[in-house]
Amino acid sequence: MISVENLVFEYPGLRALDEVSFAIEQGSITALVGPNGAGKTTLLRCMAALEQPVSGNINIAGIDVLEQPRDCHRLIGYLSDFFGLYQRLTVRQCLHFVARAQGIPEHDCAAAIADVSRRLQIEDRLAMRPGELSRGLRQRVAIAQAIIHKPRLVLLDEPASGLDPEARHELAELFLDLQRQGMTLLVSSHILAELEAYCTDMLVLRQGRIVEQVAIKTSLQRKPFKLLLAEPVTRLGELLQRVNDLSVLKIENDCSALVQVPDNPRQQHAILKALLARELPVCEFAPAASHLQDTYLQTIRQSS
Ligand SMILES: Nc1ncnc2c1ncn2[C@@H]1O[C@H](COP(=O)(O)OP(=O)(O)OP(=O)(O)O)[C@@H](O)[C@H]1O
């Protein structure tokens, strides 16, 4: 659905994106991660047709972003890291303004505002001004502005920064809801543990280059589990491959492996029984704390 090819972007004296290429599937939620200054914001701004790259191609659902930036704005919802809201307008007026700017006809605006404010749970705040809202609620209004025109692709730059744990959890639920409605999301963030709750893929950017693109969840019905043994077992990988419903993501050493199991307690119990029946000295079999964080740190270390 989205392809970026050989994208090069330069600030005066600095190449911020260097031959960046990747593809994103429709309906996925991709985490865009990388150290400070890696080029995440620059990449999102190029994809939102807000910056003009030196060279390269960006294609979103058949639209060439660099050739047809206006057409692409209709396809995209963009939340910038420093989202701005008009302080003098009420929330309803902010949403109305953006709806009209996105080409929603006047007679459809009220329904679009009602729909998006219900989804973002800000119906009771429509008469308030942004300055009267908490940071979490302002964030919701900004996201409502980004998706009011039902874009195919939503680009979010650090959407969870400054939110408390409960608001971040609600944000994760919202992203899954948007995905269920058919939207594709690209989310930049430093909060890896939370990205794991909803991301299907991860794109790692470092010094303006893509250093890794990995599938985090091949299926929402499967979960990464950590298996730890009390003693080393030779040919652990071979043994695990024979266990029904279990797939091996990574053998870390003779005592430990990262596996994938169905997201269903009964099936997980059956797998544990099967492991014990094979006399494996299991001392831990539990959801992996942060598969995404491990993968990210490994990638960044390997690429430095
Ligand atoms: N307006 C600008 N003028 C010059 N250089 C810039 C400008 N904006 C960003 N840069 C530089 O481009 C590089 C990429 O910046 P960018 O903001 O895209 O990174 P980032 O991955 O989003 O960083 P962070 O995680 O800190 O938000 C950095 O070296 C940054 O200093």
Image: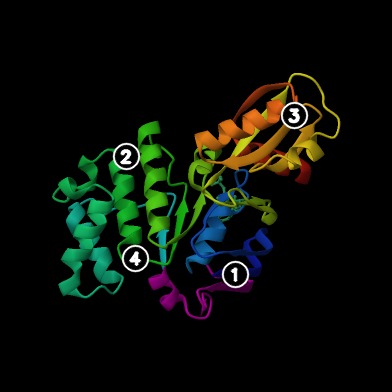
Q: CA distance from mark 1 to mark 2?
A: 34 Å
Determine contact: label 1, label 3, CB under 8 Å. no
Is the N terminus in the top left, top right, bottom left or bottom right quadrant? bottom right
Amino acid found under the numbered disc labelled 2: Arg
* Circle 2 SS class: helix
Residue under circle 1? 3
Q: Earlier in the sequence, mark 3 or mark 2?
A: 2
Q: Residue furthest front?
A: 277
Find out whether residue 248 is within the magenta segment. no
Sooner in the amino-acid sequence: mark 1 or mark 2: 1
Under circle 1, the secondary element is strand
Give me the C-alpha separation between circle 1 and circle 3: 46 Å
Q: Which residue is mark 4?
A: 150
Report the front residue among 288 and 211.
Answer: 288
Classify mark 3: helix, strand or loop.
Answer: loop
In the image, the segment drawn in magenta is 51-75
Q: Residue 35: tell me if it is visible.
A: yes
Which color mode does the image show? rainbow
For discs 3 and 2, the disc positioned in front in the rendered view? 3
Q: CA distance from mark 3 to mark 4?
A: 52 Å
Query: Mark 1 is on which residue type?
Result: Ser
Residue 295 location, x and y as percent? 67, 41
Q: Residues within 10 Å of mark 4 (few under 14, many from 20)?
A: some
Mark 1, mark 3: which one is toward the viewer?
A: 3
Residue at numbered disc 3: 278
Using residue 219 as the reference point, say whether residue 157 is left or right of it: left
Amino acid at the residue labelled 3: Arg
Residue beneath disc 2:
135
Quadrant position of the C terminus in the picture:
top right
